[in-house]
Amino acid sequence: MERPARLYGLWALLFCAGGGGLAAPAETQPPVTNLSVSVENLCTVTWTWNPPEGASPNCSLWYLSHFGNKQDKKITPETHRSEEVPLNERICLQVGSQCSTNESEKPSILVEKCISPPEGDPESAVTELQCVWHNLRYMKCTWLPGRNTSPDTNYTLYYWHSSLGQILQCENIYREDQHIACSFALTKVKDSNFDSSVQIMVKDNAGKIRPAFSIVPSSSHVKPDPPHIKSLSFQNGDLYVQWKNPQNFYSRCLSYQVEVNNTQAKTHDIFYVEEAKCQNSEFEGNLEGMICFMVPGVLPDTLNTVRIRVKTNKLCYEDDKLWSNWSQAMSIGKRAVPTAY
């Protein structure tokens, strides 16, 4: 009977050793104090708070914060949190304290602080507020009047980004059919590091409508200018196209469409181009800054008309939805001469 006794002793030893190695559950800390919220610029919302009173001296305090829907959860040692938020609806942040960065640790009781939209009838705020960054040179914002708005309302658009020292007013407001628009200069040099979002607010001069807000990331909503076709040539039954991209863009950051219309065959072909490099010997002349593409099987004795357009791609930008306008058309070949019988 000694063997079972020894096994029982071994199991007891292992159990005790394992039990002794378990970490005691972290002590729940008191809640944070003096949670407050403020707004800077147009849409920079900052929540600040003080450490909890009576926290354990052995606790290195960390703060868990998330919005009311538990999105954008963060655990940091700072007693503040800033976010760019369009203030079109009520936004609430919940904050709790804990002793580690472990998300499974139970935090203190969560304290909540909310910020509400500006006063005013929600139906009076402008709708369909959209902004597009044209060729990285100027931003154009358009909107429709709100439902409960007088037709003679005079609107004002304000904008801000981190490169500005103050909030600026857009001066160039005009109408485009039913839409109202305003454009302001926003220039990005090709090698610059401008990566700030642009904060937008539209209101009326009399203060009768609720302001509307938008945040435009600098890596999206970008519409390039059309490219410029430099030359067309035939080589061995293929059509070689050379063009120059719009300024301010690297070729690797753009995708292309090349449209070829043949009048005699009455064909309309569109080629999608992801990479267009001038490496073939068939492309002649100074190729610096040039983009090239070969269209196979094009008859030189017919008239071919070419157009090109470009858009940003996801290698450099967050979206790839906005095509440029089509370039000016260029033609090559011979127009068919009608023959009388």
Image (cartoon, grey):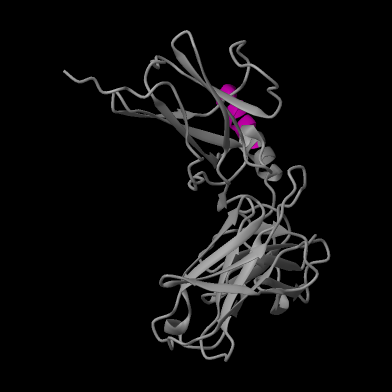
Q: Which residue is drawn at the image coordinates 40% and 86% (left, top)? A: 148
| Quarter-of-image position of residue 31 | bottom right
**Residue segment shown in magenta:** 1-12
> Is 273 situated above or below 152?
above
Residue 245 at what x, y percent from top left? Answer: 62, 36
Give the percent coordinates (x, y) of residue 134. 59, 54
Q: Is residue 19 visible?
A: yes
From where the camera sits, is residue 116 visible?
Answer: no
- Quarter residue 54 falls in: bottom right
Q: Residue placed farthest to the top in the image?
A: 236
Q: Is residue 96 left or right of residue 228?
A: right
Residue 7 located within the stretch drawn in magenta:
yes
Q: Nearer the viewer, residue 289 or 23?
A: 289
Q: Quadrant of the N terminus?
A: top right
The percent coordinates of residue 252 (x first, y second) are 63, 32
On screen, 299 above or below 315? above
Front in this rendered view, residue 63 or 212: 212
Q: Quadrant of the C terminus?
A: top left
Furthest-left residue in this view: 341
Q: Residue at horizontal 62%, vertical 56%?
A: 217
Residue lying farthest to the right in this orientation: 57
Instruction: Tell me residue 328's x, y (percent).
Output: 50, 40
Main SS of the magenta part reads helix
Name the residue furthest front: 340
